[in-house]
Image (cartoon, coloured by chain):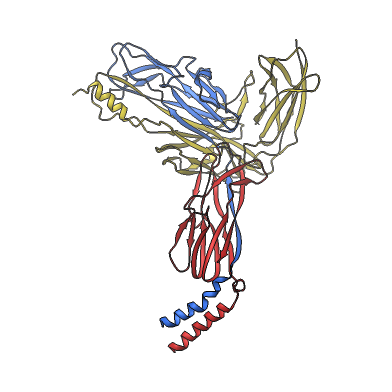
Amino acid sequence: MHRARLTLLVGLGVALAATPGAARAQTVVGVQNLAFGTVIPGVPVTIAPTDAVRAGQYRITGLFLATVTVTFTLPTAMNRVGGGASIPLTFLNTSGQWDPAVGATTTFNPNSPYTAFVWLGTTLVSLGGRASPAPSQLGGSYTSNIIMTVIIN
Amino acid sequence: MKLSKRWLTTLLALTPAPALAQGVVVAPHAVFIDHATRSGAINLYNPGQDPVEVSVSFGFGYPTTDSAGTIKVEVADSAPAGEPGNTGWLQAFPRRVTVGRQQRQTIRILATPPAGLPDGEYWGRVIIGASGGKVPVAGIPDSSDISVALTLEVRTVISVTYRKGVLTTGVTLAPLSAALETDSVAVRVPMTRTGNAAYLGTVRAEVVDSRGKVVGQAERYVGVYHVLDPKILVPVDTLPPGTYTVRVDISTDRTDLPPRSAIPASPVRDSVQFTVR
Amino acid sequence: MSRWIAALLLVLAPARAWAQASNSTVGVTATVIGSPVTFVNLQELDFATVTRGVPKSVAYGTASAGKVQVTGSSNAFAQIDFTLPGQLPNTQAPPGVDMPISFDPASAAWSRALDIPGAANSFDPASSEVGRFGPPPRPYLYVYLGGTVTPSPTQAAGIYQGTIILTITYL
């Protein structure tokens, strides 16, 4: 029985190894916006990556024993829907959080590439940031996008 | 026991500089409550390093103009008879609160309008008072010195408007007038509101010389609740003698209000000439 | 057991040789509430210690004057009203022991955009005044207040305390 289970495990590993990385259905999905919510002009708002409700979140799945590097294309501002204004955005040294299925949760600086080893399972990457509306900030909705690129080494 | 002057001075110096650099952010500066939701919110933020005590109350008032064309708001405890006031059926939660340093606080405004309230707009003002720490006086014994300690309370008055049903608004203009006053052209813009809701808009005025060149322009937000005859001052350089035209454009553009707060209406335009001798 | 796991890891090792990139996007969103009104009490009207029989005045342009910074919509107007005490009660004495305080018609002022009391518009704090916020990027309105206290030659010792209310109405 014990031997049979090990055989199965090895078989599974061999099957995985024989499958090209791209075909393993590794996926990177943005699952939650970085939402600053209601902002008062002149009052900066900082969201921590640990904020489960407001932090931006990506989910990486399908990796198995891989070294990956994540990089972000970070906007410097959110733009007003309809134009006419923007709100500066900054990302702090601890605005990124790496939360793998196996291993410790760590914070990182999203302004630089971050490299980590993934054993298996789903990894959740969270992103906080700071919005700094001006005292005379025009009312309305503001949006921007953050792109996360995952390179499997 | 008497305290020496030095001790008293020290005590006063140790007094937590009452309200120094204290303040509060109040947003928005105009609250609109719809009959469907019957609630609104005011956001407060204390940017200072000390707690601020905030109180919320209601009054009634709207902009009017005096004979000089100055816009003012007289705030009364309640609406006079015949005026569509809402102060009697609005409540703030909480009415008193201490906002900690660099903390936010939301004040909910709930409306319980009387049954059978006719369609229309109902007006009021929210008075948000804020003050800082008090000068501690207890425990200071008799002294030969005389000290004066003043506490400043700042109140911010913003509008609160309750809306029910189909609302319309607009303004009609009586004849404009314009005259040169020192370094400005003073333009009187007598407006009368139409419809069943306040006209929230912007008056833009520009002064044009005989060749069509714009020599001055100004704009001002206005709220016409019944009538308003504001004096708009258009700064100009020295104007050579001649005939000038003032063009006035009134629209419901209000960049300072949340989108869709100002009820749209067709723009109103007019002009008047004046002479510089 | 460990032998088998090591073998498994060895078998899997080549999987990491294929470099590939994937990306995904999340939005950043915020809703800004329309222009707020903000005030910051920058400076108290401070008479400090006074001498019996010697009136003490504080001019609005001095470091002892009251000073408030109000922030609002650029170029918008605001009504400024003061509620002023006429007497300051002695908080260490029975009721009725007061000190007169007065505010002359030039003891208040407002300045738009910049904190320059020397260039401010003087006004009588007993009356309503209309001030204006500065243009972008300085939508500020500064309000200044001075005053005079007049202790009598026999003024009782103690702390005389009062409250000044400044009301800012957005127009």
Quadrant (top left/top right/bottom left/bottom right) for the N terminus of chain A: bottom left
Which is more toward the observer, C66 or B230? Answer: C66
Which is more toward the observer, A36 or A79? Answer: A79
Q: Position of A56 compared to B248: left or right?
A: left
- Residue B157 lies, in percent from the top left, at 53, 32
Q: Which chain is blue?
A: C
Q: Compared to C28, does B245 lie above or below?
A: above
Q: Residue furthest left?
A: B1
| Residue drawn 52% across the image and 60% down it | A125
Q: Which chain is yellow?
A: B
Q: Compared to B196, does C109 lie above or below?
A: above
Q: Is residue C165 visible?
A: yes
Q: Compared to B267, does A116 lie above or below?
A: below
| Residue drawn 80% across the image and 19% down it | B210
Q: Can you tell which quarter of the image residue B242 is in?
A: top right
- Residue A51 lies, in percent from the top left, at 48, 55
Quadrant (top left/top right/bottom left/bottom right) for the C terminus of chain A: bottom right
Q: Is residue B35 visible?
A: no
- Residue A112 lies, in percent from the top left, at 52, 54
Q: Compared to A43, does A110 lie above or below?
A: below
Q: Can you tell which quarter of the image residue B168 is in?
A: top right
Q: Residue furthest right?
A: B211
Which is more toward the observer, B254 or C20? Answer: C20
The number of numbered discs placed on residues in the rendered structure image is 0
| Residue drawn 71% across the image and 16% down it | B179
Q: Which chain is red?
A: A
- Residue B50 lies, in percent from the top left, at 39, 37
Which is more toward the observer, B172 or B214? Answer: B214
